[in-house]
Amino acid sequence: MSSTTSLPRPNHEFLGHPKGLYVCFLTEMWERFAFYGMKALLFLYLTKHHLFADNSGYLLLGTYAGLAYALPLIGGILADKHLGMRKAVLYGGILLALGQLGMAYTGSQAQGVQGQAVQDATAIQVMYFSLALIAVGVGFLKPNISTIVGRLYAENDPRRDAGFSIFYMGINLGALVSSLVVAYIGEKYGWGYGFGLAGVMMALGLVQFVIGRKHLLGQGEPAHPERLRAPLWLGLSREWLIYLGGLLLTVAVWQILQTRIDFAPLSQLLGGHEVTLTEVLAVVLGAGLYVWFVRLLFSGISAAEKGRMIMLMTLITISALFWGLYEQTYGPWVAMADRVMDRSLFGITLTAGQTTALGALFVIALTPVFTLLWPRLDRWGLNPSYPAKFAWALVFCGLAFAVLVAATAQGSDQISLWWMVLAYFVLVLGEMMLSPVGLSAVTVLSIPRAVGMMMGAWFLFSAFGEIIAGRMGTWASVSPDASTAQTLAVYNDVFTRMMWIGLGAGALMFLVTPLLKRGMRDSK
Ligand code: GLN
C-alpha cells in the first residue's frame, strides 16, 4: 500500500494532526451538511409539497438513502483500482452539488388530497433525477474521503483513532448545522431555498477541497496515472469513461428509485404493498455477499481468523437492524414532530425538520465522553466486547422507542418536544456503542486482504438498514384527515413494535455474545 510512502512532516501539521485531515474534515462536513439537510426536509417535502401518501414518502426516503449508502461500494472500488481518491471525491462532489441544486427546482404544489393528488410530473422526474445524482455523488465521495484520512497516518501512528474521531465530529457538525439552517429555510421560506443552500455549500466545500489538495500529500492520487490517461475506447481515456459511466449509473438509479415490482406473492407477504426494485436488489446483493463471505471462510484462513471474521459478519449483519430502527428519525419521528408535537424549547419553536439536529448534537456532546470512557473501562477490565456493545446499542435503541411510547400514550394533546430530546439522547447512547465501534471492529477483526470489502459491507448494511427503515416506516402511515388522537394512536402502536424489536434483538445479541467470544478464544 502507498499509505506509508510519504508521511506528514511537521510543517504539514496543524494542532498535532496532518493538515490534510482538516481538508478532509471540511469536505466531509459540507457533504454531510448537504446530505442531512436534504434528508431532514425530504419526507416533509414529499408529503406536503408533492402530496405523496405517507407510505410512498417513507419508501422513497428509504430507497434513496439506501442507494446512497450502497453505492460507496462501487465508488470505493473504482477509486482503489483506477481513479484514485482525490479525483473520485471531486467527481462525486460535483454530482452531489448538481443534485442538490436540481432539488431546488420544486415545480408547482400538488393539488388535491395527500396520496391522490394531481402532481407536477416534470418536477417529480427532476426530483428523482436529482436524488439519483446525490446518491451516485455520495457513492463516489463518502468512502474515498474517509480512505484519504486513513492514509494521512502511518500504519502504526497512534494519532489515527483521534484523527477519525475528529473526522466523525466533522460529519456531525455538518449534520447539526444543516438540520438547523437548511430545514429552517426549507420549511419557512420555501423547499427550494433549503435544497439550493445545501447545493451551494457543497460546492463551496469542493472549492475548499481543490484549494487544499496539496495538503493531501499525494495520498489520494491514482495508482497508475498513465493508464488512466491513455485512450481506451473511441479515443476516450479510462478516466473519462469512468465519468461517463457515473452518468449512466445516475440514469439507472433515476429509474431504480421509482420502480416498483408487481409480484403478488411478495406483496401479499408485505400486507398488500408493492415491493420496490431496490428491496429486491438488496436481497440479491445481501445473498451474494454471504456467498462471498462463506467462500472466504473456506479459503484456507486459520481457525483464529475464522472466529474473528464470523464475529465481524455477525456485527455487520445486526447493524442493519440497528440502522433500520435508528433511521426512523428522518421518517416517522419528523412526521410526529410536524403533526402532533409542541416544538417549543426555551421559548424557541423549532421546525419539524430542525428536530433532527438533536441527534447530531448528542453525538458531538457524547463523543468526548465515550472516548474517555472506553480506555477507562478497559483499565478496570470492564470494557464490553464488540458483540456486547452492539447488544447494548440495540437495547438503547429499544429504550429510545420506549420513551416515545410513553410520550404518545398521552391521549389527544400535542406532545412536548422534551420527550423527543430524551428519546434522541437514549438513541445516541446506542449509536455511540455501535457506529464508531463498528468502524474500528472492521479494521481490527478483518483479515487484512478483505478489509476494504468488509468496510464496503459495513456501509452496505447501513444501506439495508435504510431500506428496512423505509419499509418499517410505512407502518406509521396516517391518513390525511386523522385527528391528533388517531395519529398519536398510530405512532404509539408503531413505536411499541419498534421498541420490542430493539429490546428483543438486543437480548438475542446478549445470548450469542458468549458463543462469539468462545469462537474467538477457542481459535486462538
Ligand atoms: N452518521 C454517520 C455518517 O453519516 C454514520 C451513518 C451510517 O453508517 N449509517 O457518516
Image (tube, helix red, strand yellow):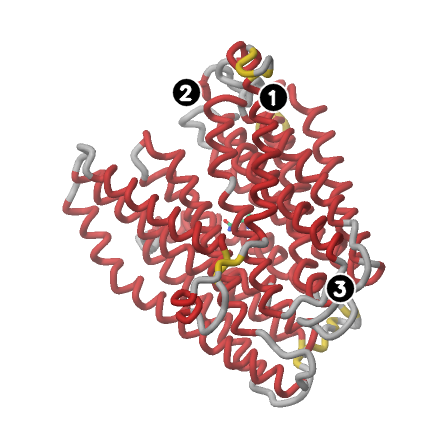
| Quarter of image, res 320 | bottom left
Circle nearer the N terminus (2, 3): 2
The reply to whether residue 246 is visible in this rendering is yes
Q: Which residue carries the number 1 mark?
A: 240
**Vertical side of 81 occupied by 67: above or below:** below
Q: In which quarter of the image is the N terminus?
A: top left
Q: Residue at x 38, y 36 (%)?
A: 453
Residue 439 locus on image (x, y percent): 43, 44
Tell me if mark 2 has few (under 14), some (14-19) or many (20+) residues whose alpha carbon lies within 10 angstroms of its own. few
- How far apart are the alpha carbons under marks 1 and 2? 25 Å
> Horizontally, is 13 left or right of 41 in the view?
left
Q: Name the amino acid type tagged 1.
A: Trp
Q: Nearer the viewer, mark 1 or mark 2?
A: 1
Tell me if mark 1 has few (under 14), some (14-19) or many (20+) residues whose alpha carbon lies within 10 angstroms of its own. some
Secondary structure found at label 2? loop
Q: Which residue carries the number 3 mark?
A: 49
Q: Which residue is drawn at 46% across and 23% down?
A: 81
